[in-house]
Amino acid sequence: MEDSLQEAGLNVKQVKEMFLYVGEKVQENKPLLTRLDSAIGDGDHGIGMSVGFKKAAENLGQKELATINDIFKTIGMSMISSMGGASGVIFGTLFMGGVKGLESQQELDLPLLANIFEKSLEAIKTRGKASLGDKTMIDALEPAVNALKQSADQHADILNGIKAAEENAEKGVENSKKYIAKFGRAKTLGERAIGHQDAGATTVWIIFKSMREWIENVSVSH
């Protein structure tokens, strides 16, 4: 598995299994995400993310998935259709935005992953108008994407690229505590939101952390 990770990346079946694992981990963190969002938001982020990934798991299990593109689209559409609201659109775009117009892909290597999430980041910023420092999921996603791109430029394998993204996302979550919110209910709190980390940024970190865990577990078992 190590060789295939370094050379070709993950095949369609592996990417599906990885994101099923990611979904399980996000659902396990529902209490944490709910607590974080209750402090400065509407308190529904954990529930929404759990519902979105549960629906994604159902659809990933039922649909015939021939390409990497199919997996990302299925997850994104599941989130938009089941979650509703801004989070559904934003996290749906996290998965759908980066594969729009992309040629069919059978392998997910680090350059492709970096490209997908970079395009997703651009789509989210265009749609949501948020920037780094606005106390949103961008605070974790943008540093993570930068790490993916830098790692790909340095010809790292997908595991090390995701590790770097996870580390940058975690720093982004920590940094989000320092910011005044520019969006959502937290915006009304002004400086009272300082000291609280953003729930959406935390979800982004959990996604990259879970991707890394899955790849490491598969590498060890092969």
Image: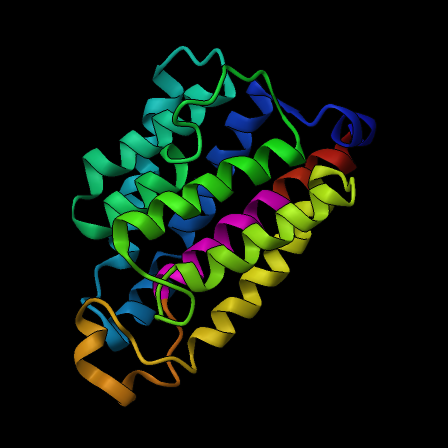
| Quarter of the N terminus within the rendering | top right
Query: Does 210 lie within the magenta span?
Result: yes
Query: Does 215 lie within the magenta span?
Result: no
> Magenta residues: mostly which secondary structure?
helix
Residue 58 point in image, percent of width and height: 33, 26
The colour style of the image is rainbow
x 35%, y 56%: residue: 30
Q: Which residue is farthest right?
A: 3
Residue 120 point in image, percent of width and height: 42, 41
Left-right relation of 102 to 30? right
Residue 67 point in image, percent of width and height: 50, 15
Say if 210 sits above or below 12 in the image. below
Q: Nearer the viewer, residue 96 or 166?
A: 96
Left-right relation of 115 to 136? right
Say if 8 sits above or below 98 in the image. above
User: How many numbered marks have been drawn onto this rendered protein structure?
Assistant: 0
x 37%, y 69%: residue: 198
Q: Using the rendered view, name the quadrant where residue 46 is placed.
A: bottom left
Q: Nearer the viewer, residue 162 or 61?
A: 162
- Magenta residues? 199-212
Left-right relation of 141 to 10? left
x 69%, y 38%: residue: 158
Q: Using the rendered view, name the quadrant where residue 119 is placed.
A: top left
x 40%, y 74%: residue: 197
Residue 117 point in image, percent of width and height: 49, 41
| Quarter of the C terminus within the rendering | top right
